[in-house]
Amino acid sequence: MGSLVAVSSLREFFKQLLLEAADHQHVHLAEVTEFYLVNLLAEFAAAEKLFAEDEGGRRDQEPLALLYYRALQQSRADRIRTLRRLGDTSLYRLGFFSTSLRDSPVGPEYYVQMGGRAYAQLADLVRPGAFAGAYQELFEKFRPLVEVLEEIAARGMASGGPDSVLKVYESWVRTGNDRLERVLVDAGIVVKKSGLPN
């Protein structure tokens, strides 16, 4: 925990994290899907990518239903962009902010349905293009990929010092999540199934 890792780029850093987490989760991905997810993680590393800007220049999270409605009204090229944003935003929010979504009015399942549906429609829209297979795989493995991103988020949090490790621990106590337990063990925290550290 807390050791520096030398990487040549942000994308290389995310590729290493993605491959490790996917391996832990036993999620096998096509190379084009790995490439897509690495780019998604690198893009969303800039916080403003997660938010839409309104006419006043204020940034806010755009409701998924609004994105979907807009996609239905658009030309093919714009529909592809909007559905991609819908799928990517759903996947990223679930992977990195699932705890906060549990208290939201719509909940995580809404994000799973909207994101999965967006990727399925994208696969049909771009077929037989190069990314049709990636979108299809993102649709078919949406839930396992959320778990991969959750592990990446937890590992990032656990490397942030004692307060961050405590947050991972509190999430583990609340959820009993095996991925969080593995992150804690890797961070040097020995845990018991009762939720009390050794």
Image (cartoon, rainbow, N blue to C red):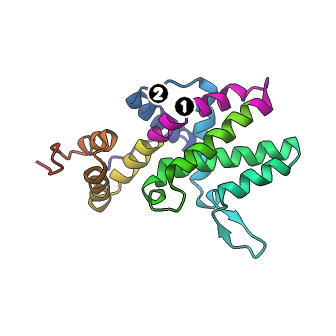
Q: Which stretch is magenta?
A: 124-148
Q: Kindly state the secondary structure of the residue where label 2 is placed.
A: loop
The amino acid at mark 2 is: Val
Q: In the rendering, at what x and y percent does residue 18 appear?
A: 48, 36
User: CB of mark 2 within 8 Å of CB of mark 1?
Assistant: yes
What is the number of callouts on the image? 2
Indicate yes or no whether the magenta region holds residue 91. Answer: no
Question: What residue do we see at 86% from left, 49% from top?
Answer: 74
Question: What residue do we see at 15% from left, 47% from top?
Answer: 194
In which quadrant of the rendered view does residue 120 lie?
top right
Label at residue 53: none
Mark toward the start of the polypeptide (2 vs 1)? 2
The amino acid at mark 1 is: Lys
Q: In the rendering, at what x and y percent does residue 187 appear?
A: 26, 45
**Towards the viewer: 152 or 98:** 98
Question: What residue do we see at 21% from left, 45% from top?
Answer: 188
Classify 10 Å Cα crowding around label 1: few (below 14), some (14-19), many (20 and above).
some
Q: Is residue 181 above or below residue 28?
A: below
Q: In the rendering, at what x and y percent does residue 165 appear?
A: 29, 55
Q: Is residue 179 above or below residue 127?
A: below
* In the image: residue 82, left or right of residue 60: right
Label at residue 27: 2
Question: What residue do we see at 61% from left, 33% from top?
Answer: 139
Residue at numbered disc 1: 141
In which quadrant of the rendered view does residue 25 lie?
top left
